[in-house]
Amino acid sequence: MKIKAVGAYSAKQPLEPMDITRREPGPNDVKIEIAYCGVCHSDLHQVRSEWAGTVYPCVPGHEIVGRVVAVGDQLKKSAPGDLVGVG
């Protein structure tokens, strides 16, 4: 599935809007419509390839708040409409 994101294509480029492809959610996944996402300094280290293993395009942000829009059939604790935080 195609989604909108903000990321970098290399360590030297600034963050910019982009479209990326994500896999479809599976039976143990929730799909979240992101309302807010924090970018901490560790995210910037990763984007700048200051730590090993950066894969580009790199989309920073692992502190997320949003609403569940879909739930895998193996999950029982989440439902569409739930307000959730990740990270």
Image (cartoon, grey):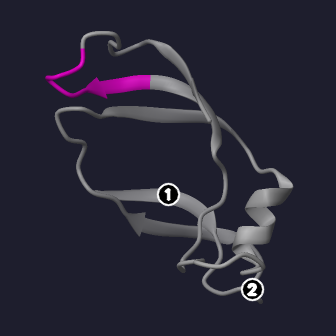
Question: On residue 30, which mark appears?
Answer: none
* Sequence-earlier tag: 1 or 2: 1
Quadrant (top left, top right, bottom left, bottom right) of the N terminus:
bottom left
Q: Position of residue 4 (x, y in %)?
A: 49, 57
Disc 2: which residue: 13
- Amino acid of disc 1: Lys
Q: Nearer the viewer, mark 1 or mark 2?
A: 2
**61 or 54: which is nearer to us?**
54
Question: On residue 4, which mark appears?
Answer: 1
Residue found 65% across the figure and 76% down from its top? 8
Secondary element type, mark 2? loop
Secondary element type, mark 1? strand
Residue found 79% across the figure and 69% down from its top? 45
Residue found 33% across the figure and 10% down from its top? 77
Count of numbered marks: 2
Please tell me in which quadrant of the rendered image residue 80 appears: top left
Residue found 32% across the figure and 12% down from its top? 79
Q: Position of residue 42 (x, y in %)?
A: 79, 58
- For the record, the magenta segment spans 68-75
Q: Position of residue 25 (x, y in %)?
A: 25, 43
In the rendered view, tell whether residue 47 sits above or below residue 31: below
- CA–CA distance in space, label 1 to label 2: 18 Å
Estimate how packed mark 1 is, as few (under 14), some (14 to 19) or many (20 or more) residues with alpha carbons within 10 Å: few
In the rendered view, tell whether residue 81 sits above or below residue 3: above
15 lies left or right of 56 = right
Residue 64 in magenta stretch: no
74 lies left or right of 48 = left
